[in-house]
Image (spheres, rainbow, N blue to C red):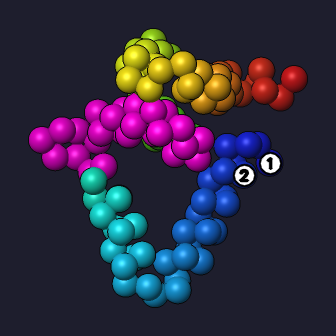
């Protein structure tokens, strides 16, 4: 199982377990989080790019992974990813560099899955 599949499988299973507990506050927050990224006056693609900047500045690797996957699904290309990372770096400073490295590795895996298999 690839790192991406492991991440998605774990996220799905844990979300199901957490939401299945029926805690109203938790369930409402999860719903709010999902709704925030739906298209509106600002399209979904742009909102995911904003989420990636914020996640990088906040240095949340799981969030970065999620938003990289969503951005990729929505057609963000490598040049756009590195413009996103430039914004995150300027806002967050050099402390985000290790997170940029892991995100760049993930993007490389997404754009050339054969490279990861070698």
Magenta region? 37-63
Image quadrant occupied by the C terminus: top right
Residue at 46% from the left image edge and 87% from the top image edge:
22
Does residue 114 appear to the left or right of 79 in the view shown? Answer: right
| 45, 105: nearer the viewer | 105
Q: Which mark is residue 1?
A: 1
Does residue 89 appear to the left or right of 105 in the view shown? Answer: left
Residue at 12% from the left image edge and 41% from the top image edge:
41
For the residue labelled by badge 2, is the local secondary structure a helix, a strand or a loop? helix
The 10 Å Cα crowd at callout 2, few under 14, some 14 to 19, many 20 or more, is few
Q: How many numbered marks appear?
A: 2
Q: Are marks 2 and 1 in contact (CB under 8 Å)?
A: yes
Mark 2 vs mark 1: give the one in front. Answer: 2
Note whether 23 is above or below 104 in the view shown.
Answer: below
Check disc 2 and report the residue beneath it. Answer: 6
Toward the bottom, the furthest residue is 22
Q: Which mark is residue 12?
A: none
Does residue 60 appear to the left or right of 75 in the view shown? Answer: right
Q: Earlier in the sequence, mark 2 or mark 1?
A: 1
Residue 45 shown in magenta: yes
Residue 101 shown in magenta: no
For the residue labelled by badge 1, is the local secondary structure a helix, a strand or a loop? loop
């Amino acid at each position: 199982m690839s790192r991406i599949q492991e991440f998605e499988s774990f996220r799905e299973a844990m979300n199901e377990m957490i939401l299945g507990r029926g805690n109203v506050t938790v369930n409402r927050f999860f719903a709010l989080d999902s709704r925030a990224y739906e298209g509106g006056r600002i399209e979904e693609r742009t909102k995911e790019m904003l989420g990636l900047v914020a996640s990088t500045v906040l240095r949340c690797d799981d969030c970065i992974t999620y938003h990289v996957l969503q951005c990729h699904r929505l057609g963000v290309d490598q040049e756009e990813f590195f413009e996103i990372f430039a914004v995150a770096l300027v806002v967050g400073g050099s402390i985000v560099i290790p997170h940029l490295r892991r995100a760049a590795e993930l993007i490389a895996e997404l754009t050339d899955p054969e490279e990861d298999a070698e």
